DNA sequence: CAGTGAGCGAGCTTCCGCTTGACTT
């Protein structure tokens, strides 16, 4: 029996550490937090001074039982959760949940997973820091109070099942605000002029381009300028050389990894985290949820060796990076390869690509600066005050660029500055062509998942472990959608001087194209408006940062945690009560126009089931008519014609096999119905224009699919069927589904087998909440 | 799965941050 039990947070970490510690130590993991506020109700006793009601999380009962047993048998228990607020709380929860004794419990922390660091930690144990635990309790209770008082208010005032919270609501606000900025953005245009020049050097003609620094306001102004250029001579007036340098980006944190993987590999935030988890579990990289850019001494030494071996000593430059992000807790290292001498790994394509990115970024971070020589050449126009400027860039020493260059979010990219010919003052130049081109100003860019994470990190909102889940929550709640949008064609003016002639042409370009961008939905906009109106302080971008300061004071023992919560809760709760009583239903109702048939008002608004249109007044005696909007329609920009179309449903298409076929739009999108059965339409079908022929095609196709899905039927009992679905074969009995136990051949199932399987409580279907019918 | 939208009242939804598998019709 092991004398010592060490408990860490992650099982992969436990495995590594056990190797360092020898037989006397058993290393186990808690799989993160083991206790949390009660799931039901508020979980906080407000009257008694915000006493939290903790319980062991349902998915941790098993591990707690096991750890309890091991702790009892051990002589000493070492709580080795991470060295941050949450980690301290995990240790404290373990202490309570495992009924540990003070005298046989030690708290240890280490910053890197090396034998030295761990041995040193064991030699320097301490006790649980109760102040730090209190800071975590304050964080936890505040989030629960905010989330569990705001959400029910939304259910009542806006729509059921919605959610609000310190992090997610601000994330949605960022996207809503950005869309508003874009809507209000006024596009203007101006002209830039680029000349293609020729110079004769050693009997060779060399071409290069130069730009007029000034932007021209109009076509006419450009034409005048080009007219002058026709007869002008061009001379190099001055050349200037300046040295420049570029430094590598720091090693990856969760947030920067998500950004780079999005830009360079096109990964979603969730995908990046899934692949990184796989790399971590197979021991390829260090921990992937971190806000630290720090590398261990060992990692730096490995990087130095590797760079020297690959490129030589002049490429090495050891650097210590400092984190800039707000609220960083730095319990881990930066994300880096475990073994820097492995430049590649086995694995699937995603794993290889992500590893390659991490390896390059890490190694490059310890390499020399790239050194440039920048050249500026001014070109005089003999009959005009304006000048042309040619810019060139030559790399004198590539340094880290040999390996890796961080990409940017700027979609237009910078102009590539090429190599200029060796120009001297007084050189005479000839123009080949001079082009004036209309350029448009651009609205601020919509967020991608990764650029939203960057913004959140900048504001100190959310943590490395929650970026990906938060992004998926706001999409799951349908506050935000991630979409591609097609661009539109735009015309722009060009004027060219070539061979002494000036020619104007209109060219076309595609603009407004968006790939995987985040757009707010009607409901996202509405909820944001509601929260901004009644809870501006929670929606303030600095709210998290300011409560974080208070958490720090609690951690330092300068503030009592439940006093801080009490000070916050008082005014917050009055606002909740006030809004509850004094505000009306918040539906975003908008008067769209008049119904030409009835002469009544047409409104659009958000109802219990989402966006809808209404003809007539809610308060009138005669009940108004309602119609749901289609999924891709928005109350923001729907037209009255589109709304009137919606009221034409259900449309009778005709008869098929003696029964009516109708088309309509339901909760799950457009469908046709026939003999009381429903058939969803394809994305390409439009319920407004679909004809009987196509409807029959859809009906027959679905019927065919249903027939094909049947593996077995029983004459004796028509209710019982063996079917094949998305996840393989299953048993269906009167709309209830049961999975087939492993090792059973579905073809050989008898009716008795099926009934037996369905009656086994182990296979009972999960209880699902079904909305009651009226 | 399904054609709702008033109001009533039952029972339900909801937060953030720490961790992985179990599980889906």
Image (cartoon, rainbow, N blue to C red):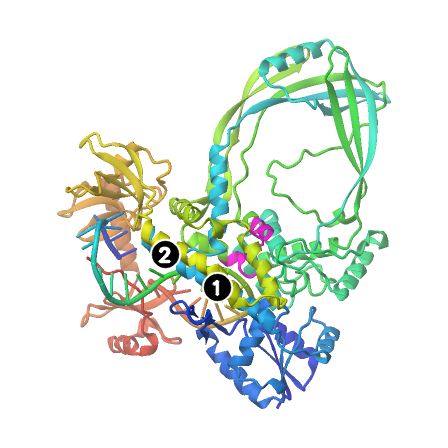
Report in which chain the residue with disc 2 lies: A
Picture coordinates of residue A100, whole percent (x, y): 56, 84
Residue in front for this viewpoint, A272 or A74: A74
Up-down: is A607 above or below A218?
Answer: below
Q: Quadrant of residue A502?
A: top right
Q: Which residue is mark 1?
A: A566
Question: Circle 1: is it few (<14), some (14-19), or many (20+) Cα within 10 Å?
Answer: some
Q: Which residue is mark 2?
A: A577
Mark number displayed over residue A169: none
Q: Residue at x 25, y 49 (%)?
A: A699
Real-space CA distance between mark 1 and mark 2, rounded to the nearest whole angstrom = 16 Å
Regarding mark 1 in the picture, which secondary structure is present there?
helix
Residue furthest to the left? A658
Regarding mark 2 in the picture, which secondary structure is present there?
helix
Q: Residue at x 69, y 65 (%)?
A: A338
The N terminus of chain A sits in image quarter? bottom right
Magenta region = A453-469
Picture coordinates of residue A67, whole percent (x, y): 54, 82
Report in which chain the residue with disc 1 lies: A
Picture coordinates of residue B6, whole percent (x, y): 22, 49
Up-down: is A15 above or below A269?
Answer: below
The C terminus of chain A sits in image quarter? bottom left
Q: Is residue A348 visible?
A: no
Does the magenta segment cover residue A41? no
Same chain check for tags 1 and 2:
yes
Residue in front for this viewpoint, A728 or A257: A257
In the picture, measured across the screen, residue A24 lies left or right of residue A157, that is right
Q: Quadrant of residue A336?
A: bottom right
């Amino acid at each position: 029996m092991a004398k010592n039990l060490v408990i860490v947070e992650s099982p992969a970490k436990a495995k590594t550490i056990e190797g360092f510690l020898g037989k006397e130590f058993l290393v186990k993991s808690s799989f993160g937090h083991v206790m949390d506020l009660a799931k039901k109700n508020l979980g906080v006793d407000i009257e008694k001074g915000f006493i939290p009601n903790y319980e062991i999380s349902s998915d941790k009962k098993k591990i707690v039982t096991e750890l309890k047993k091991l702790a009892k048998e051990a002589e000493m228990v070492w709580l080795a959760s991470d060295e941050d607020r949450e980690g301290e709380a995990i240790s404290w929860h373990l202490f309570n949940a495992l009924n540990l004794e003070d005298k046989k419990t030690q708290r240890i922390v280490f910053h890197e997973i090396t034998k030295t660091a761990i041995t040193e930690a064991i030699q320097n144990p301490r006790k649980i820091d109760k102040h730090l635990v209190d800071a975590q309790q304050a964080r936890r209770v505040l989030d629960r109070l905010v989330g569990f008082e705001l959400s029910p208010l939304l259910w009542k005032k806006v729509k059921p099942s919605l959610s609000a919270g310190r992090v997610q609501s601000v994330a949605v606000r960022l996207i809503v605000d950005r869309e508003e900025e874009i809507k209000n953005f006024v596009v203007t245009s101006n002209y830039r002029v680029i000349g293609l020049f020729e110079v004769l050097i050693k009997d060779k003609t060399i071409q290069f381009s130069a730009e007029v620094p000034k932007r021209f306001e109009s076509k006419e102004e450009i034409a005048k300028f080009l007219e002058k250029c026709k007869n002008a001579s061009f001379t190099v007036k001055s050349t200037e050389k300046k040295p420049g340098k570029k430094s590598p980006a720091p090693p990856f944190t969760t947030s920067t990894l998500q950004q780079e993987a999005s830009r360079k590999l096109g990964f979603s935030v969730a995908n990046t985290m899934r692949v990184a988890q796989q790399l971590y579990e197979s021991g390829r990289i260090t921990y992937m949820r971190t806000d630290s850019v720090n590398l261990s001494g060992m990692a730096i030494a490995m990087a130095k060796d590797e760079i020297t071996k690959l490129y030589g000593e002049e490429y090495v430059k050891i650097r210590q990076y400092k984190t800039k992000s707000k609220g960083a807790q730095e319990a881990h290292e930066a994300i880096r390869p475990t073994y820097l001498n492995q430049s590649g790994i086995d694995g699937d394509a995603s794993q290889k690509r992500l590893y390659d990115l991490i390896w390059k970024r890490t190694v490059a971070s310890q390499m020399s600066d790239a050194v440039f020589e920048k050249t500026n050449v001014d070109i005089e126009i003999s009959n005009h005050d304006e000048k042309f400027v040619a810019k060139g860039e030559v790399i004198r020493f590539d340094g880290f660029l040999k390996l890796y260059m961080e990409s940017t979010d700027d979609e237009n990219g910078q102009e590539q500055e090429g190599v200029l010919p060796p120009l001297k003052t007084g050189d005479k130049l000839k123009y080949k062509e001079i082009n004036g081109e209309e350029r448009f100003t651009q609205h601020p860019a919509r967020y991608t998942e990764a650029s939203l994470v960057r913004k959140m990190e900048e504001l100190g909102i959310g943590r490395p472990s929650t970026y990906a889940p938060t992004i998926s929550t706001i999409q799951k709640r349908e506050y935000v959608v991630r979409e591609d949008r097609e661009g539109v064609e735009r015309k722009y003016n060009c004027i060219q001087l070539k061979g002494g002639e000036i020619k104007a042409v209109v060219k076309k370009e595609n603009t407004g194209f968006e790939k995987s961008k985040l757009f707010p939905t009607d409901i996202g906009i509405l909820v944001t408006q509601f929260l901004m109106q009644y809870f501006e302080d929670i929606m303030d971008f600095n709210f998290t940062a300011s409560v974080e300061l208070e958490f720090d004071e609690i951690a330092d023992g300068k503030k009592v945690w439940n006093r801080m919560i009490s000070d916050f809760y008082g005014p917050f709760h009055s606002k909740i009560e006030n809004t509850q009583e004094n505000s009306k239903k918040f539906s975003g109702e908008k008067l769209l126009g008049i119904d030409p048939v009835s002469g009544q008002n047409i409104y659009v608004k958000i109802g219990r089931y989402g966006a809808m249109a209404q003809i007539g007044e809610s308060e009138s005696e005669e009940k108004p008519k309602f119609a749901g909007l289609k999924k891709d329609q928005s109350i923001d920009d729907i037209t009255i014609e589109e709304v009137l179309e919606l009221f034409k449903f259900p449309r009778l298409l005709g008869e098929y096999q003696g029964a009516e076929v109708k088309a309509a739009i339901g909760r799950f999108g457009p469908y046709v119905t026939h003999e009381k059965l429903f058939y969803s339409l394809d994305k390409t079908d439009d319920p407004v224009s679909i004809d009987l022929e196509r409807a029959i095609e859809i009906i027959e196709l679905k019927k065919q699919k249903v027939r094909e899905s049947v593996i077995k039927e029983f004459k004796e009992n028509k209710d019982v069927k063996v079917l094949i679905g998305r996840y393989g074969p299953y048993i269906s009995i009167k709309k209830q589904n049961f999975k087939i136990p492993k090792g059973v051949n579905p073809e050989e199932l008898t009716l008795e087998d099926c009934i037996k399987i369905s009656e086994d409580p182990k296979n009972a279907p999960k209880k699902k909440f079904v909305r009651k019918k009226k």
